[in-house]
Image: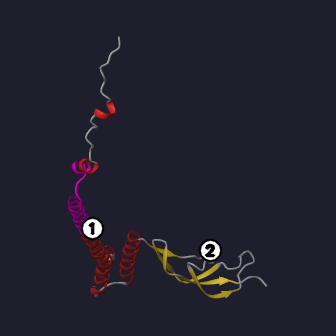
């Protein structure tokens, strides 16, 4: 027996699924252009505000640093000045006394010189006295050259110091004025 009943064709009767719109899906997940623009403007305003604050802070730091440099230059010698006041007081006391012997005056001057040397040491001011040393043009200024008094003395040796030099923390502020030996002919 043959079945004469017909089966419906799937292609003719099947209903295709409802198409989904990409635009509809994106609209729900992605903000609109207006929202994106508003968000970008807010971020730009935040960045601009942060930049203005950083710029103001930089200017304040620069201004404070300039003030500190000015104060450091103005008051750099304050400690040394305090040390010099004691030396000045000693000299004034020596001059104020009318009845002094030469010996007492000499003792007072020696004491005052020790105060001055102590003040120099505290301030990093070192004496350059190169007698017998090799001539160094960075620390010494040669005034003249003379024959060495003996054959053992090498050329360019400091024979006489006319004026001591001084260095402040290893920086020469006044070279020593010296007489050096000539090279043997």
Tell me the residue at 60%/80% (across/down): 137
Does any portion of residue 86 appear in the rendered image? no
Dot 2 corresponds to which residue? 133
Work out whether mark 2 precedes mark 1 in sequence or the reverse, and give the earlier one: 1
Q: Position of residue 7 (x, y in %)?
A: 31, 24
Classify mark 2: helix, strand or loop: loop
Dot 1 corresponds to which residue? 51
The quadrant in which the N terminus is found is top left
In the shown orientation, is residue 7 left or right of residue 128? left
Segment colored magenta: 26-53
Estimate the spatial distance between the alpha carbons at disc 2 and disc 1, rounded to whole Å: 61 Å
Q: Residues within 10 Å of mark 2 (few under 14, many from 20)?
A: few
Relative to 92, is 49 above or below? Answer: above
Tell me the residue at 75%/77% (across/down): 151
> Is 112 or 132 nearer to us in this picture?
132
Classify mark 1: helix, strand or loop: helix
Does any portion of residue 184 appear in the rendered image? yes
Residue most toward the right?
185
In the shown orientation, is residue 163 left or right of residue 76? right
């Amino acid at each position: 027996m043959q079945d004469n009943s017909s089966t419906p064709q799937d292609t003719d009767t099947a209903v295709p699924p409802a198409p989904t719109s990409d635009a509809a899906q994106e609209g729900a997940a992605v903000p609109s252009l207006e929202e994106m623009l508003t968000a970008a403007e807010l971020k730009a305003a935040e960045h601009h505000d942060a930049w203005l604050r950083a710029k103001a802070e930089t200017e304040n730091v620069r201004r404070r640093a300039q003030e500190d440099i000015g104060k450091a230059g103005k008051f750099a010698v304050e400690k040394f000045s305090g040390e010099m006041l004691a030396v000045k007081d000693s000299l004034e006391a020596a001059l104020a006394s009318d009845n002094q012997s030469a010996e007492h005056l000499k003792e007072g001057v020696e004491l005052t010189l020790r105060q001055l040397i102590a003040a120099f040491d505290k301030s990093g001011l070192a004496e350059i006295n190169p007698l017998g040393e090799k001539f160094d043009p960075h620390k010494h200024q040669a005034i003249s050259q003379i024959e060495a008094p003996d054959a053992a003395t090498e050329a360019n040796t400091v024979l006489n110091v006319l004026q001591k030099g001084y260095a402040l923390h290893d920086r020469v502020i006044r070279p020593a004025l010296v007489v050096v030996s000539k090279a043997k002919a």
